[in-house]
């Protein structure tokens, strides 16, 4: 099902700036057991992104109403995608402040991942495609995802579940669809995202869950060598939850105790 500006539709104007320039943002929300998971966090991040891009949309309650309306018609768990574009305008980069933003909400079948991904871990590909640095766009989930598209198409091996991406200095930033955490000497770390990458909703939830379980998260810049020398590694996003990493370049990693604590805490927080 697709709603465009609150109406059932599967068409947008050809001049929409989301299509023409990637001028917009999106959120991917898990709809499970009749619940839109972490809805408030997703809506808050989306509207914060609109502020940062000067897109004139801040109607959280309208989005909430439309999301609930769409989900009321679903009969199964789904992935819900919300897109806000700057709206339709003429050719050229200049954006008229009087444009009316476009709202697109769509539902998609829930992906079927093996249970083993969460239990015994996944194999990771180290991507050659790097992430560009841009402090203005860093952290937000804007529509420009071509780097992730190129990175994800580096492998076809079905045994590889995710790829990790680096910046031009060969420092770890994120996965193609996830954030990454490492554990070293019982300390939890995640990359700084002040110059590139997406600050995921589940990433922020892990900060909260870690604190509730007596753990702290430190943001730092770390290299490929530091990644490979970690005691535990896991990736996360709002749809898949937490996946331990068990294999990178034939190096085997255990599903460690801190990863398991956070998985259990996440499962409890959704009940």
Image (tube, grey):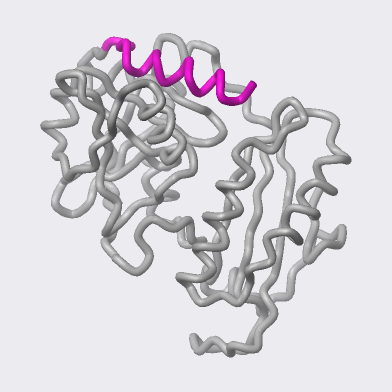
Above or below — where is 100 with respect to 209?
A: below
Q: Quadrant of residue 175?
A: top left
Where's residue 47, x and y in %? 57, 62
Q: Main secondary structure of the magenta part?
A: helix
Viewer-closest of 164 and 243:
243
Q: Quadrant of residue 155?
A: top left
In this rendering, would 153 be left or right of 26?
Answer: left
Where's residue 124, x and y in %? 33, 27
> Residue shown at 76%/49% (left/top)?
67
> Residue shown at 30%/12% (left/top)?
256
The mark total stands at 0
In this rendering, would 155 be left or right of 239?
Answer: left
Instruction: Decide if residue 156 is in sight here.
Output: no
Where's residue 52, x and y in %? 45, 70
Where's residue 240, x and y in %? 53, 28
Above or below — where is 28 with respect to 83?
A: above
Question: Magenta segment range?
Answer: 254-271
Instruction: Decide if residue 56 is in sight here.
Output: yes
Whether the magenta-drawn stretch holds residue 237 is answered as: no
> The C terminus lies in which quarter of the figure?
top right
In this rendering, would 231 be left or right of 110?
Answer: left
> Residue shown at 85%/30% (left/top)?
75
Above or below — where is 199 with respect to 143?
A: above
Above or below — where is 241 with respect to 178?
A: above
């Amino acid at each position: 099902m697709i709603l465009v500006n609150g109406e059932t539709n599967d068409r947008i104007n050809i001049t929409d700036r989301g299509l023409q320039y990637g001028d917009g943002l999106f959120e991917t929300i898990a709809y499970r057991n009749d619940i839109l998971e972490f809805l408030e966090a997703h809506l808050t991040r989306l509207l914060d992104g609109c502020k940062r891009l000067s897109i004139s949309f801040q109607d959280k309650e309208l989005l909430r109403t439309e999301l609930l309306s769409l989900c009321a018609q679903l009969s199964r768990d789904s992935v819900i995608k919300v897109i806000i574009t700057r709206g339709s305008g003429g050719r050229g980069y200049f954006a008229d402040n009087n444009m009316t933003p476009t709202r697109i909400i769509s539902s998609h079948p829930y992906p079927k991942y093996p249970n083993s991904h969460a239990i015994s871990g996944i194999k990771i590909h180290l991507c050659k495609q790097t992430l560009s640095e841009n402090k203005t766009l860093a952290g937000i989930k804007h529509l420009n995802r071509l780097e992730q598209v190129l990175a994800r198409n580096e492998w076809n091996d079905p045994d590889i579940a995710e790829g990790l991406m680096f910046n031009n200095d060969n420092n770890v930033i994120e996965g193609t669809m996830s954030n990454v955490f490492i554990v070293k000497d019982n300390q939890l770390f995640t990359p700084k995202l002040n110059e590139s990458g997406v600050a995921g909703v589940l990433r922020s939830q892990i900060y909260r869950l870690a604190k509730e379980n007596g753990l702290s998260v430190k943001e730092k810049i770390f290299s490929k060598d530091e990644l490979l020398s970690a005691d535990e590694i896991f990736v996360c996003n709002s749809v898949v939850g937490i996946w331990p990493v068990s294999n990178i370049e034939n190096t085997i990693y255990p599903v460690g105790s801190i990863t398991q604590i956070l998985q259990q805490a996440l499962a409890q927080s959704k009940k």
